Amino acid sequence: MRSQIVAAAAALVLGVAAPAAREAVDRPPVAPTAAKVAPGLVALPCVGDSPITPVAPVYCRRDRHYVTERAKASLEAAAATVAKRFPGAQVQYMDASWPAGRRPMPPHRSHGDGRQIDITLFYVDRDGRPLQRPPTRNGYEAYEPPRFERERVCVGQRAPHNDGKDPPQDRAWRLDEARTRELVRTLAADPRVRRVFLEPHLKTRLGFGSNPKVRFAGCAAARHDDHIHVDFY
């Protein structure tokens, strides 16, 4: 599953899914297509100066940025809270849902009905300076691995969870614990949020060990130490 999601995200970002219409990551976003939008779904902001913005414009260009009205209100409130405490911080999203409003939205096991979204973690460089965007082009696979081997889950299992490989120890980025913690705290406190998927080692590290809303997605799911998956009611 992890490899499928990343491959699909790479296809979106690099344009490999449609060679005749290859698109650059930094090309400005365009207005949503004329695709029919299911009742109750709305588009997330696509411009870069909003408190919530896509990691890459292609998520909007390919119509993978739809959510329910309640989900949008929750995300905008969370983004505003994070930006108030950390001026200049932006909540950046990848796959949300398509306008059709049907689940699942391949290659995901869920998504599609407007109640799910993938959001990037926040990062700093090796000197502790905040990065303005995730260190990968599509937002996925910038893993923050466990600090200790005993914290790993699904070890020895043939499961999608193990598709993602840890980055090298000398990588140029690290998890920004303060901004990521504030984002997860704000989302988990919102009654419109059903659950937040995060790896067990990050759940403990960030101080959410006793929070029932912050959960492990299980060994059949992709890793969630490179992004946060949020489910809404």
Image (cartoon, rainbow, N blue to C red):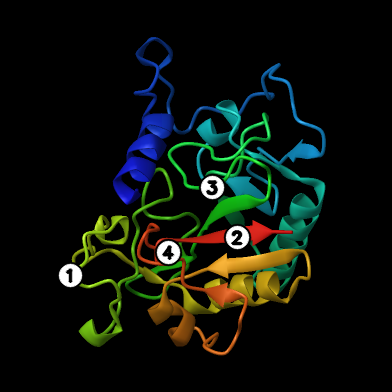
> In the rendered view, would you say 51 is above or below 173?
above
- Find disc 1 in the rendering and name its residue: 156
Q: Which of marks 2 and 4 is nearer the N terminus?
A: 4
Question: Which quadrant is home to the C terminus?
Answer: bottom right
Q: Name the residue under label 2.
A: 230
Could you tell me how far apart the alpha carbons at marks 2 and 4 are, in whole angstroms?
A: 11 Å
Quick one: label 4 or label 1, which is nearer the N terminus?
Answer: 1
User: Element at badge 2?
Assistant: strand
Residue underneath mark 3:
110
Residue type at mark 2?
Val
Q: Which amino acid does label 4 sit on?
A: His
Given residues 109 and 146, the one toward you in this image is 109
Mark 4 secondary-structure assignment? loop
Indicate which disc, 1 or 2, sits on the residue closer to the N terminus: 1
Crowd around label 3: few <14 · some 14–19 · many ≥20 (10 Å): some
Crowding around mark 1 (Cα neighbors within 10 Å: few <14, some 14 to 19, many 20+) is few
For the residues marked 1 and 2, what is the alpha-carbon distance in whole angstroms?
Answer: 27 Å
Is 31 displayed left or right of 19 in the figure? right
Residue bearing the label numbered 4:
224
Q: Which of marks 4 and 3 is nearer the N terminus?
A: 3
User: Would residue 127 be found to the left or right of residue 122 on screen?
Assistant: left
In front: mark 1 or mark 2? 1
**Distance between mark 4 and mark 1 Cα atoms:** 18 Å
Q: Position of residue 207 (x, y in %)?
A: 53, 88
Q: Would you call the spot at circle 2 few (<14 residues within 10 Å), some (14-19), or many (20 or more)?
A: many
Q: Who's the residue at 73% across and 21% down the image?
A: 36
Q: Where is residue 200 in the image (x, y as percent from the top left)?
A: 42, 78
